[in-house]
Amino acid sequence: MKFLIINPFGIGDVLFTTPVIRAIKHSQPDSRISFWCNERAAGILKSVPDVGGIFALSRGDLKKIYERSFFSGVKKALDLFSGIKKEHFDVSVDFSLDHRYGFVSKLAGIKRRIGLNYRNRGRFLTDKIDIQEGYSGKHVVEYYLDLLKFLNIRPEEKRLFLTVSATDKMKSSLLLESFGVKESDLLVGIAPGAGASWGKNAKFKHWPVIRFAQLAERIMEVFGAKLLILGSPSERPIAEAISYSMKKKPVDLVGRITLEELPAVISNLKLLVANDGGVLHIAVALGAKTVSIFGPVDERVYGPYPESSAHIVIRKDLLCRPCYKNFRLDICNMDRECLNSISTNEVFDAARIQLIQTQ
């Protein structure tokens, strides 16, 4: 059997599909599984076990190409369609919530198209679960795993999966060494951004920069740790502001390593402290300890999965949160109190618990 997994969203969403991929592969060891994602997330799939081919072009990616050149857009679209059709997939598992992906799957000759029917946008699906509103009440992973019932598969494990090869691990050690990191160093990472998938609204998920700087300094001082700043190239101003605010300088890797290199680097960490975003979920999938900070987003739906003492979530139980509902972010009339009211001490105390337990 040949399966096509479709998820055109961010890194976290892509990783939320990994329990589904693992369950399919366990149930059908001879199956071939490919993934249709966006260009930005493609790099992380190289570390997802059991994924063969990758089709990296989302509707959003295609729109940007069309804006630059109509003919380039047409060529890209045709190449994508031709590539998918050529594979002769038996089943697609569609998490796009968008009828256009189902339509392409149908045109490409995929006979069985399983997915989530969000507000009747799954009209081209052959097997579907109806959802009228956004994800709520349970984790996104649980919504995804529900689709396995159409394949008569019961998942044996419910966790995110990423692997780092011995070669990539060695390369990451050499890379870190080039930034002055020794093998004996206690490594702690911070991810003060929130990823690119939220665009300009990502700022509403940011814990204040100055507190990240204060936290980083305390961790370095108390534990003698080497501090790494991680994130995407668009988050360079955040990293520079943190570094500028610190007396003892961290190792700033934001925009200086690729997404393909990031999992191997994170696998060296004793702890990651992060806002809600893709870097957090990479760490969770690798089994690293985390402290995460959640503001407008419901951690029960989008947080570390599964819940574990290895992952401490810091949030404030305000009446107005979560304000990200039905895939929309409400206008904040509270000056982001959900994040601004989280103190450096609270996050440091959680980090200390995690670091003490690793020693």
Image (cartoon, rainbow, N blue to C red):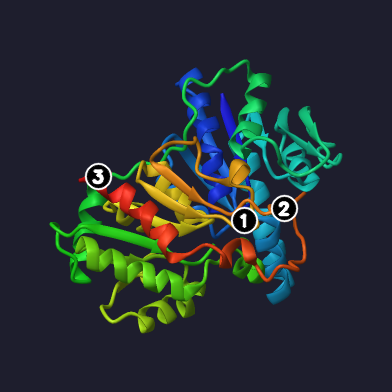
Q: Does residue 263 appear to the left or right of 126 in the view shown?
A: left
In the picture, measured across the screen, residue 28 lies left or right of residue 81, that is left
Q: Which residue is mark 1?
A: 57
Q: Quadrant of residue 92?
A: top right
| Callout 2 crowding tier (Cα within 10 Å): few <14, some 14–19, many ≥20 | few
**Quadrant position of residue 339:** bottom right
Q: Which residue is mark 2?
A: 319
Q: Say which mark, if any, is on residue 187.
A: none
Closest to the observer, 227 or 123: 227
Q: If you read the primary sequence from the N terminus, does the residue marked by circle 3 or circle 1 appear first?
A: 1
Residue picked out by circle 3: 358
Q: Earlier in the sequence, mark 1 or mark 2?
A: 1
**In front: label 3 or label 1:** 3
- Determine the CA span between mark 3 and mark 1: 40 Å
Whole-number angstrom distance, CA of label 3 to CA of label 2: 35 Å
Q: Position of residue 32 (x, y in %)?
A: 50, 30
Up-down relation of residue 2 to residue 102 (above or below): above
Q: Is residue 100 left or right of residue 77?
A: right
Q: Element at badge 1?
A: loop
The disc labelled 1 sits on which kind of residue? Leu
Residue occupying the far top of the picture: 152
The residue positioned 50% from the left and 18% from the top of the image is 27
Residue at 44% from the left image edge and 36% from the top image edge: 308
What type is the residue that disc 3 sits on?
A: Thr
- Figure check: 316 above or below 125: below
Which amino acid lies under the numbered mark 2 shown in the image of this protein? Leu
- Foreground of the two, 160 or 303: 303
